Structures are given as structure tokens and as C-alpha cells.
Image (spheres, rainbow, N blue to C red):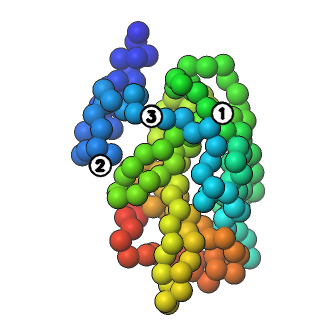
Amino acid sequence: MMRKKTLFVAILLAAASIGGMVGTTPTTVHAKTRSLTTFPKRYRHTWYHYIGHGKYDTQKFTAKTWQYTSHAGGYVKVKSSLHPTSTYPYQHKEHSSWVFGSTIFARKAHWINIKLWNQNAGYGDYYKTSTKKYHGKKISTLSAASGLVQTSDHYYRSKKVAKQLKNHHFKGEVYEH
């Protein structure tokens, strides 16, 4: 019972600080959360973000897996399997290689939210795909965000484009400070 009260208070505080950005009340957040059974097709690629010195962070989506590699602060590679559930995953047995995916609508876009299976604190990671224009050319982009759904990085479908655009900020995006 105490855990449910703590969760409700956390959701209430998050909703109050977001200021209605998501457009749901704390009592309807749980009811509207839909577990992904597969990642949408538009995400299913290897995406690259250039971090400098010839190194790239990557996000790789398949129908049922999400893989993240990072060179920031040392080499990290995480590969996780998507597992649908009708309840919050922190209520289940621990599985360190499983993730829970859901969808939200925030900042005029559809995002997927990925949380570690037993993650009971924090917002998880948010991703959206879109087509951006850069010097008149259309570019497929994967935007990564956290917390208040403020974009932190953009990933691209080729290393060449990732290196060219590096940390480019696109008009109309809300970025972390």
C-alpha cells in the first residue's frame, strides 16, 4: 500500500512540474499506458550519433530488441529484449536484460518510452522519429530525450550524416539546457 501511495505522489509531482505537457492526469496515466509488443517499423534501424574523435554512440532497434552503445566515459553496450505487460514492470520478477516500452504524445509528437524492466524511479528514455530538413535535404532522424521530453541528442541512419550534423539543433525542437 505504501508503494502505491509513493507512486501516486511521484506521478502527481511529475504531472504538476510538467504543467500538463502530456495532457493526462495522474489518475489516468496508468490506464492509458499501453505496452508495446514490438517496436514500430520506422525505428527498426541502426542509428548513429557522432561524439567526436571518430567515435559514435548507437541505438539499434529490431522488432523485439533495443541495443545501445556509448563511448562517453568509457565503452558501454546494453542489449535488451522488449517484453509487453499489462502492469508496471517493477511489479514483476527482476530481469536485467528486459525493457518495457510504451507510447506517449508530448510536444506535438508521438514518442516511445523505454524503461528498464524493474525500473521504479526515473522517467526512462524517450525516442521519436521524424524527417528533418537540412540544407534542403530530407534526413531521417531519431531524437533522444529524457525527463521532461526535452531532446538531448539526434541520431541518424548513416555515420556520414551523423558526423556532418554532430550536435546540430533543429528549429522547433525543445532541447535540454
Q: State the SS at label 2.
A: loop
25 horizontally vs 106: left or right: left
Q: In which quarter of the image is the N terminus?
A: top left
Q: Earlier in the sequence, mark 2 or mark 1?
A: 2
Q: In front of the other: label 2 or label 3?
A: 3
Q: In front of the other: label 2 or label 1?
A: 1
Residue 15 in picture, x, y percent from top left = 29, 38
23 horizontally vs 70: left or right: left
In space, the residues marked 2 and 3 are separated at their CA atoms by 16 Å
**Crowdedness near tag 3: few (<14), some (14–19) or many (≥20) residues, C-alpha within 10 Å:** some
Determine the residue positioned at 59% across, 36% down.
Answer: 100
Q: Which mark is residue 21?
A: 2
Residue 49 in picture, x, y percent from top left = 63, 69
Q: Earlier in the sequence, mark 2 or mark 3?
A: 2
Determine the residue positioned at 67% across, 38% down.
Answer: 82
Q: Earlier in the sequence, mark 3 or mark 1?
A: 3
Q: Which of 121 and 111 is in front in this view?
A: 111
Determine the residue positioned at 55% across, 69% down.
Answer: 141
Residue contact between numbered discs 2 and 3, judged by CB atoms under 8 Å? no
Q: Can residue 26 be seen in this view?
A: yes
Residue 46 in picture, x, y percent from top left = 71, 62
In space, the residues marked 2 and 1 are separated at their CA atoms by 27 Å
Q: Which amino acid does label 1 sit on?
A: His
Q: State the SS at label 3.
A: loop
- Relative to 60, residue 115 above or below: above
**Crowdedness near tag 2: few (<14), some (14–19) or many (≥20) residues, C-alpha within 10 Å:** some
Q: What residue type is labelled 2?
A: Met
From the image, tell me which residue sits under label 3: 33
In space, the residues marked 3 and 1 are separated at their CA atoms by 14 Å
Determine the residue positioned at 63% across, 76% down.
Answer: 162
- Relative to 123, residue 59 above or below: below
